[in-house]
Image: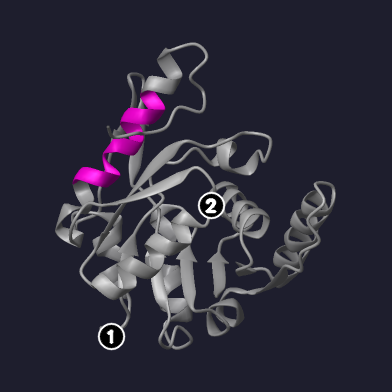
């Protein structure tokens, strides 16, 4: 399966790209608004993988070209860039599945707080911007980007999936399971995305206030 990570030069994009390339045989494509930056980051990820005995080819393209080549398109961009990113590639998505891991947050002296867009969640925001026939799945919201990108770290974390298309959700579940130590759990439809996304600032605040929990994640037992 071909996975395009739009904004794949950023933290969450790097972590997911390295994990999929290291743990699976899925083809990973890095997208960026700047194709030179996409290619440079793809080369950087390849070098990291080679240093760990994994010889993988990762390509980098401008976002629209990355989306055009993918079966699954991951919007690994900050929440406020989601609509612009979708609109820039909407004619290239085709029959791909769109995945949204972004969370709207704001910071004050007390810490981080959930700050959803008017749509109610970033997942719904992405769905509003996407073509009506493109399924949108919310996933990977509560994972530490630093922990993902550090291949020395063994994962033992859950990720919650929300979406209204069961087949698309099943595909994203398989992609999540392809990363060792990630357990995907179905959290229902997109209407439940606010509850899922709001866990992210909570997790970050816990990490901030408790020594030794910088890379804290979520598990359900």
Residue 199 percent across, percent down from the top left: 29, 37
Nearer the observer, 168 or 205: 168
Q: Is residue 86 above or below residue 189?
A: below
Location of the C terminus (image quadrant): top left
The residue located at (33%, 47%) in the rendering is 104
The mark tally for this picture is 2
- The magenta stretch is 195-205
**Label 2 residue SS:** loop
Label of residue 133 in the image: 1
Q: Residue at x 50, y 58 (%)?
A: 76
Q: Label 2 crowding class (10 Å Cα cut-off): few <14, some 14-19, many 20+? A: some
Q: Which residue is mark 2?
A: 179
* Residue 69 sits inside the magenta stretch: no
Is 95 located above or below residue 135 in the figure?
Answer: below
Which secondary structure lies at badge 1? loop
Q: What mark, if any, has residue 32 been given in the picture?
A: none
């Amino acid at each position: 399966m071909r996975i395009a990570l739009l904004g794949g030069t950023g933290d969450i994009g790097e972590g997911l790209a390295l994990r999929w390339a290291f743990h699976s045989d899925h083809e990973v494509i890095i997208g960026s608004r700047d194709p030179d930056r996409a290619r440079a980051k793809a080369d950087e990820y390849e070098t990291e993988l080679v240093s760990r005995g994994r010889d993988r080819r990762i390509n980098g393209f401008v976002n629209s070209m990355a989306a055009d080549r993918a079966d699954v398109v991951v919007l690994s961009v900050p929440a406020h860039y989601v609509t612009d990113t979708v609109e820039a590639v909407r004619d290239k998505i085709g029959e791909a599945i769109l995945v949204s891991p972004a969370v709207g947050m704001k910071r004050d002296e007390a810490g981080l707080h959930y700050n959803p867009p008017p749509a109610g969640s970033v997942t719904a925001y992405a769905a509003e911007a996407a073509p009506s026939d493109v399924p949108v799945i919310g996933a990977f919201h509560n994972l530490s980007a630093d922990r993902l990108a550090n291949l020395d770290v063994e994962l033992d974390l859950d990720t919650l999936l929300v979406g209204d298309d069961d087949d698309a959700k099943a595909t994203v579940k398989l992609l999540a399971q392809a990363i060792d130590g990630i357990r995907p759990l179905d959290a229902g439809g997109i209407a439940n995305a606010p509850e899922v996304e709001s866990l992210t600032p909570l997790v970050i605040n816990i990490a901030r206030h408790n020594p030794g929990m910088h890379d804290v994640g979520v598990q359900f037992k």
